[in-house]
């Protein structure tokens, strides 16, 4: 099961080649930086103090070569680390997308769509960023090691001070980073929730305006955004406190090294050049510790993000795949045996191949629970749902949904042309499907016909136009079993009658289940069943039920 640690480990090992290369280049840079004060000290002792012009030129050339190497190594270390960072973040995004789109479902449970998007963008980037900071952490250690060795050659006490003082400094850095990690986790959680609420409100903007609920929606988002702001400010204060404390500790440590070097020089234990080198190395030590402070802060945020990524990747599936198979060709018989799920209670239903069945649910919750079972978004608590005699639980969800397609009432359209939205599977049935769903009229009303580009989620279309395009897409898929939920609630009565008249023809020989209360659609069905109290209470033709069943009449005709 994915954990925060395994997510981070996978992000690093997946880019191992680039991380190692960047670490070598960055270590070369830090090692060269540490050598600069040593070279300057030797230049003072061997050239300035002695007045040797040859030695001066020689050491200046050495310095020029070192600086050229510093420029080259840093530039390519940063490029390589950034490449590893971006590629790792992309890999995390792909893993998250694969899990969210997994036919077994479950990843979206308890999360708004906007929150999932936030995890796949902000958190994935922070996880990938680990590869951007680790090479410089290695470089920081390399710089410390070169400094310690150089100081040992100058003076054993100076070298030991660096070697023995570094581990406690690193331990303190880790302890100081813990509050930042906790507050970063809360900050990211609040930010994701705010993004989810914002996306939810934008998606339902038309509905909110229609019912005059803009004020309530704005108040809700304001509360959520204020909570996110407070969490962000707490995390920022923790970050500032973390950096300030690390900087203060580092300053004290460097001051101790400089004071000890000055004391040794005053007593004649080291030369003037060695004193200059020691002071320069003491000042250089600020850079590795600044790197450690930066790396620690980045890792704290990455661990919090990795925990959120892992929670999505480890989300238990809503359904488990089976190993059974449906015999080809799929005849399309559908059967529910004593199904209990949500408000459904021991529901029995048999749909022979090729039947056009209408389902009227007196309680909308019954319809929702039935669609969940038929779409295998969830398995019933008891009972079984079968297609061609094979239980759904014995089939892989992907294979099952190729045989049984549930077209949801609020199906989304994608950004692209109208034709590309209808002919997603390339079945070649788009023209016929457009006519059957009365979506050809939608195409005629658009400037470029079926090649007209529609916006994300079909927001450039009206509600009725979106419904017709979504219904055409379901028809074009031409599955053996098609389950459609309230496909005409936003279209006018004339268009609804046209769709009803085309329905039997385009689905001839295929099993179709219409979960609806539309009289026009129900009149076109072969049979209608009434689900009341979670079970099948009545069945017959639309005309028979209108005449004989008062509950049916009030549900369908009111």
Image (cartoon, grey):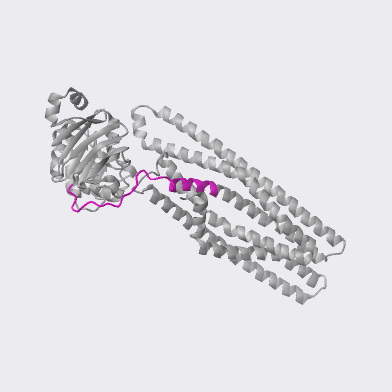
Magenta region, mostly helix, strand or loop?
loop
For image coordinates 26% across by 41% down, the residue present is 384
Q: Is residue 443 left or right of residue 296?
A: left
Residue 315 falls inside the magenta stretch: yes
Q: Position of residue 35 (x, y in %)?
A: 70, 66
Q: Position of residue 271 (x, y in %)?
A: 83, 66
Residue 65 falls inside the magenta stretch: no
- Compared to residue 360, the image places residue 401 above or below, namely below
- Compared to residue 467, the image places residue 323 above or below, namely below
Question: Which of the 4 quarters of the picture holds residue 108?
Answer: top left
As drawn, the residue found furthest toward the right would be 267
For image coordinates 82% across by 58% down, the residue present is 262
State which quarter of the image contains the C terminus: top left
Question: Which of the 4 quarters of the picture holds residue 551?
Answer: top left
- Compared to residue 362, the image places residue 70 above or below, namely below
Specify the segment rendered in magenta. 302-331
As drawn, the residue found furthest toward the bottom would be 54
Q: Position of residue 325 (x, y in %)?
A: 25, 52
Q: Position of residue 485 (x, y in %)?
A: 25, 37
Q: Is residue 172 left or right of residue 421?
A: right
For image coordinates 76% across by 69% down, the residue present is 42
Is residue 408 shown to the viewer in this render? no
Q: Is residue 293 left or right of residue 540?
A: right
For image coordinates 68% across by 63% down, the residue present is 145
């Amino acid at each position: 099961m994915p954990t925060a640690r395994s997510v981070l480990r996978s992000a690093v090992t997946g880019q191992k080649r680039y991380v190692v290369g960047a670490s070598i280049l960055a270590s070369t840079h830090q090692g060269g930086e540490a050598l600069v004060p040593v070279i300057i000290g030797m230049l003072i002792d061997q050239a300035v103090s002695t007045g040797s012009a040859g030695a001066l030129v020689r050491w200046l050339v050495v310095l020029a070569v070192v600086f050229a190497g510093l420029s080259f190594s840093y530039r390519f270390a940063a490029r390589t680390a950034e490449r590893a960072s971006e590629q790792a973040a992309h890999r995390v995004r792909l893993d998250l997308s694969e899990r969210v789109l997994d036919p077994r479902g479950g990843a979206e449970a308890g999360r708004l769509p906007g929150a999932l998007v936030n995890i796949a963008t902000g958190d994935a980037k922070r996880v990938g960023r680990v590869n951007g900071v680790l090479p410089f952490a290695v470089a920081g250690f390399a710089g410390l090691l070169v400094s310690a060795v150089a100081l040992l050659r100058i003076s054993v006490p100076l070298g030991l001070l660096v070697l023995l003082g570094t581990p406690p400094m690193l331990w303190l850095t880790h302890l100081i980073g813990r509050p930042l990690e906790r507050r970063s986790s809360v900050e990211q959680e609040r930010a994701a929730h705010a993004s989810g609420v914002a996306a939810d409100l934008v998606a339902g903007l038309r509905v909110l305006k229609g019912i005059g609920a803009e004020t309530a929606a704005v108040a809700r988002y304001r509360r959520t955004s204020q909570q996110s702001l407070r969490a962000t400010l707490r995390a920022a204060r923790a970050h500032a406190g973390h950096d300030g404390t690390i900087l203060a500790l580092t300053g004290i440590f460097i001051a101790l090294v400089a004071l000890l070097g000055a004391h040794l020089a005053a007593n004649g234990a080291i030369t003037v050049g060695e004193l200059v080198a020691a002071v320069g190395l003491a000042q250089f030590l600020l850079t590795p510790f600044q790197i450690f402070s930066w790396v620690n802060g980045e890792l704290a945020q990455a661990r919090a993000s990795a925990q959120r990524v892992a929670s999505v990747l480890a989300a238990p599936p809503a359904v488990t795949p089976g190993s059974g198979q449906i015999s080809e060709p799929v005849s399309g018989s559908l059967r529910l045996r004593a199904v209990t799920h949500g408000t459904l209670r021991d529901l029995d239903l048999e749909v022979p191949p090729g039947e056009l069945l209408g389902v009227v649910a007196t309680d909308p919750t019954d319809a929702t629970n039935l669609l969940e079972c038929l779409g295998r978004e969830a398995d019933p608590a008891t009972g079984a749902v079968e297609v061609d005699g094979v239980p759904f639980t014995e089939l892989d969800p992907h294979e099952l949904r190729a045989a049984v397609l549930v077209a949801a009432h609020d199906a989304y359209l994608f950004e692209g042309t109208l034709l590309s939205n209808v002919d997603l599977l390339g079945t070649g049935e788009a023209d016929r499907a457009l006519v059957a769903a009365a979506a050809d009229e939608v195409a005629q009303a658009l400037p470029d016909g079926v090649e007209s580009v529609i916006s994300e989620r079909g927001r450039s279309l009206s509600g009725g136009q979106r419904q017709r395009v979504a219904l055409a897409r379901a028809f074009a898929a031409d599955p053996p079993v098609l389950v459609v939920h309230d496909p005409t609630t936003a279209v006018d009565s004339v268009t609804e009658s046209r769709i009803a008249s085309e329905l039997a023809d385009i689905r001839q020989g295929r099993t179709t289940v219409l979960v609806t209360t539309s009289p026009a659609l129900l009149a076109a069905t072969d049979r209608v069943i009434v689900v009341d109290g979670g079970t099948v209470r009545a069945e017959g033709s639309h005309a028979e039920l209108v005449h004989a069943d008062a509950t049916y009449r009030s549900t369908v005709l009111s």
